[in-house]
C-alpha cells in the first residue's frame, strides 16, 4: 500500500513537472517571438518577421498541450492548496502567453508593409518601448520559472512605464500625421504596432499577477498602476 501511494505521488510530481516544462518552453518561444518582432520593425528585418510568424503554431500547440495536462491533473489528482493555485493559474498564464504570441506575429506582419520602408518618421520611441516590453516579459517569465513573488510584483509595478511610453508614442505619431498627410498610412501601421506592444506589456503583467497569486495565495490590487493619458482609452 505504501509503495502504491509513493508511486502515485511520484507520478503526480512528474505531471506537475511536465506541465511546468511545457510552460517554460512556451515562455521561451513567445520571448523569442517578441524579440524577433521588435527586430523586424526596428531594423526592418524581413527574416526576423518570418521567424516571429513561424513560431506562432508552436505556441498554439503548447497551449493546447498544457490545457490537456491541467484537465488531467484536476480530474485525476485533485490538487489542493499551492498545487491547486498553480494548476489553475497555468490555464490563465498560457492564455496570456498565447496572446503575446499573437501580438508578436501581428507586429511582424505589419513590419513588412511597404508603407513603412520609406516612412519619414522616427522609430526611436518604438525601439525604446520594444526594449522595455521585452524586459518586462523576460522578467515575468523568469518569475514564472522561479515562482518568485518579489520579481512578479516588480513586473506588475513596471506596467506604468509601458503605458507612459505608449501614450507618448500615440501623441508623437498623431503629430506626424497632422504635419504631413503622406505620413498617415505609415503612422497608422505604427500605431497598431505600438498598441500590440502595449498589449504584450499588459499580458506580461497578467502573468506576473498570476505568479504572485500562485506563490503567495494573495491577489494583487485589482487596479494596477497605469500611466495617465488623455484622449484615448487603453
Image: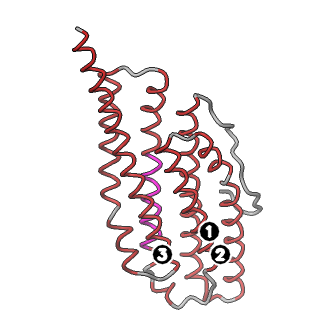
Residue 180 placement (x, y as % from top left): 67, 89
Q: Looking at the image, which residue is at 31% across and 23% down?
A: 75
Q: Which residue position holds label 1?
A: 129
Q: Nearer the viewer, residue 143 or 3?
A: 3
Residue 183 placement (x, y as % from top left): 61, 86
Q: Is residue 83 above or below residue 158?
A: above
Secondary structure, mark 1, is helix
* Stretch of the chain drawn in magenta: 95-109
Q: Quadrant of the N terminus?
A: top left
First in sequence: mark 1 or mark 3?
3
Residue 140 placement (x, y as % from top left): 54, 50
Q: Looking at the image, which residue is at 46% across and 70% down?
A: 37
Q: How many C-alpha atoms fall within 10 Å of the one at disc 2: few (<14), some, or many (≥20)?
A: some
Q: Looking at the image, which residue is at 35% across and 54% down?
A: 59
Q: Which residue position holds label 3?
A: 39
Q: Quadrant of the C terminus?
A: bottom right
Separation of marks 1 and 3 at Cα, in angstroms = 12 Å
Q: Hey, which quadrant is residue 195 in on the image?
A: bottom right
Q: Is residue 45 above or below residue 66?
A: below
Q: Which residue position holds label 2?
A: 125
Image disc number at residue 156:
none
Residue 32 placement (x, y as % from top left): 42, 63
Q: Looking at the image, which residue is at 61% across and 90% down?
A: 120
**Residue 26 on the magenta segment:** no
Secondary structure, mark 3, is helix
Q: Nearer the viewer, residue 232 or 90?
A: 90
Amino acid at each position: 500500500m505504501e509503495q502504491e501511494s509513493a508511486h502515485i505521488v511520484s507520478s503526480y510530481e512528474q505531471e506537475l513537472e511536465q506541465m511546468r516544462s511545457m510552460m517554460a518552453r512556451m515562455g521561451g518561444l513567445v520571448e523569442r517571438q517578441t524579440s524577433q518582432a521588435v527586430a523586424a520593425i526596428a531594423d526592418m528585418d524581413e527574416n526576423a518577421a518570418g521567424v516571429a510568424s513561424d513560431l506562432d503554431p508552436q505556441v498554439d500547440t503548447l497551449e493546447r498541450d498544457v490545457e490537456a495536462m491541467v484537465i488531467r491533473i484536476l480530474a485525476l489528482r485533485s490538487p489542493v492548496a499551492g498545487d491547486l493555485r498553480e494548476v489553475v493559474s497555468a490555464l490563465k498564464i498560457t492564455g496570456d502567453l498565447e496572446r503575446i504570441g499573437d501580438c508578436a506575429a501581428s507586429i511582424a506582419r505589419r513590419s513588412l508593409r511597404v508603407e513603412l520602408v520609406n516612412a519619414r518618421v522616427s522609430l526611436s520611441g518604438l525601439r525604446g518601448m520594444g526594449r522595455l516590453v521585452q524586459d518586462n516579459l523576460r522578467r515575468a517569465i523568469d518569475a514564472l520559472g522561479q515562482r518568485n513573488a518579489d520579481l512578479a510584483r516588480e513586473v506588475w509595478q513596471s506596467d506604468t512605464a509601458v503605458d507612459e511610453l505608449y501614450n507618448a508614442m500615440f501623441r508623437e505619431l498623431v503629430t506626424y500625421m497632422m504635419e504631413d498627410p503622406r505620413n498617415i498610412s505609415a503612422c497608422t501601421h505604427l500605431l497598431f504596432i505600438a498598441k500590440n506592444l502595449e498589449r504584450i506589456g499588459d499580458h506580461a503583467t497578467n502573468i506576473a499577477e498570476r505568479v504572485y497569486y500562485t506563490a503567495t495565495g494573495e491577489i494583487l490590487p485589482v487596479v494596477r498602476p497605469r500611466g495617465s493619458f488623455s484622449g484615448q482609452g487603453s
